[in-house]
Amino acid sequence: MPTRIGYGVTGGPDIENTGTCARKHYPPAYHAGALQTLAVLDAMRRRPDASRDRAIVIGQSFGGTIAIAVAAIGPPGVQAAIN
């Protein structure tokens, strides 16, 4: 299961930090998460055991909104996004 940078064992800073609770600014965080997801899709397409032209993007909570952001970008082969 791919995990975005800054979560779990990936380490590093949370590049999706949206600011304090009083001043959230989500668009850059969604963009950062979407770029990471697109990189995972690209890596999966290079695997011999994965389809190069069909994918489903799934996320929950913040990952769900990133799945929607990826669907809005419309990468080739992404057939569905599940939040």
Image (cartoon, grey):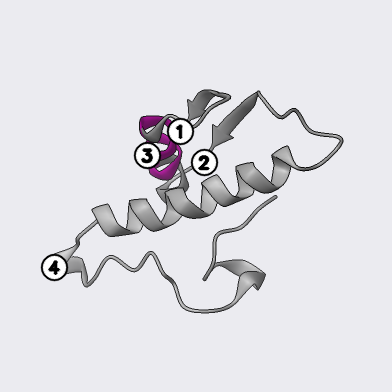
- Residue 35 position in % (x across, y down): 46, 52
Q: Earlier in the sequence, mark 2 or mark 4?
A: 4
* Closer to the eye: label 2 or 3: 3
From what the image shows, is residue 55 above or below residue 45? Answer: above
Q: CA distance from mark 2 to mark 4?
A: 25 Å
**Residue at point 51% right, 41% down?**
59
Q: Amino acid at mark 1?
A: Asn
Residues at marks 1 and 4 touching, judged by CB atoms closer than 8 Å: no
Q: Earlier in the sequence, mark 1 or mark 4?
A: 4
Q: Amino acid at mark 2?
A: Gly
User: Which of the 4 image quadrants contains residue 4?
Assistant: bottom right
Q: CA distance from mark 1 to mark 4?
A: 25 Å
Magenta-drawn segment: 65-72
Q: Kindly give the residue lying farthest to the left in the view shown.
A: 22
Q: CA distance from mark 4 to mark 3?
A: 23 Å
Q: Kindly give the residue lying farthest to the right in the view shown.
A: 48
Q: Which mark is residue 3?
A: none
* Closer to the eye: label 1 or 3: 3
- Residues 31 and 66: in front is 31
Q: Amino acid at mark 4?
A: Ala
The residue tagged 3 is: 69
Q: CA distance from mark 2 to mark 3?
A: 11 Å
Q: Which mark is residue 83?
A: 1
